[in-house]
Amino acid sequence: MPAPIIVSDGVISPEMRARRDAAIYVALPAGEVIFAPAAETANGTVVYDPLFFNNVEVDGLTQKFANGRLTSMAAKTGLQDVKKYYDAGTAGKDEFTFADIGVNPGVTFIPGSKMTISMPAGMVSLGTGSNVFMGGSNASRFSFGSSVSGATVTIDGKEIVKVATSFDNGNHNLPNH
């Protein structure tokens, strides 16, 4: 069974409480849609915004995907810490397993900031490895995700998120769900 699509609206419903499973995800402020892309469909390159990983700044992290698997990663700085974590990961660490699309127009990303949050409209977070947190089946000991701000998202040729800003990172295609 595929992982559920999670709409974080800030509410833990009675149904969610009754389930008592890993797919209970609520964030405040709310405003994100999280899903597991269809297996083996991610193809392309993602260049993430600057991020911090284990207190180390990682700049220019670039990941390449083919048929839903991470085939390479590079960065201008900080790659050694991400790579050490990746190398210690278990089976499934290279699978593209989750996407998180920010849809809250009331939360803004500060251009140039290195501190990111997932819910501003146009923020897209992508990840590899474990997706158990969202009810998925990948239980790798490796789970990594980061963000691309001001993104335009196209799924099956249909533009579903478009945020035109001075810090737009371009068009990042996500695979089908």
Image: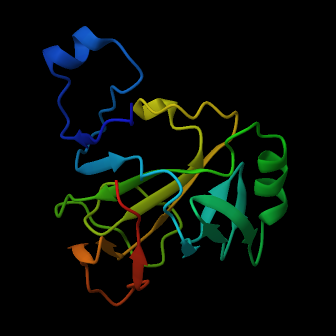
Q: Position of residue 15 (x, y in %)?
A: 17, 16
Q: Position of residue 160 (x, y in %)?
A: 22, 70
Above or below, comparing residue 32 to residue 161 in the picture: above
**Residue 52 horizontal side relative to residue 171, left or right:** right
Which of 90 and 32 lies nearest the eye of the viewer? 90
Q: Position of residue 119 (x, y in %)?
A: 30, 55
Going 24% across and 41% down the picture, which residue do you hit?
A: 8
Going 34% across and 12% down the picture, which residue do you hit?
A: 20
Which of 169 and 154 lies nearest the eye of the viewer? 154
Instruction: State the quadrant of the N terminus.
Output: top left
Choose top left, top right, bottom left or bottom right for residue 46: bottom right
Going 38% across and 72% down the picture, which residue do you hit?
A: 110
Above or below, comparing residue 160 to residue 26 in the picture: below
Which of 134 and 48 lies nearest the eye of the viewer? 134
Colour pattern = rainbow
**Residue 165 horizontal side relative to residue 149, left or right:** left
Q: Position of residue 157 (x, y in %)?
A: 28, 77
Mark count: 0
Choose top left, top right, bottom left or bottom right for residue 6: top left
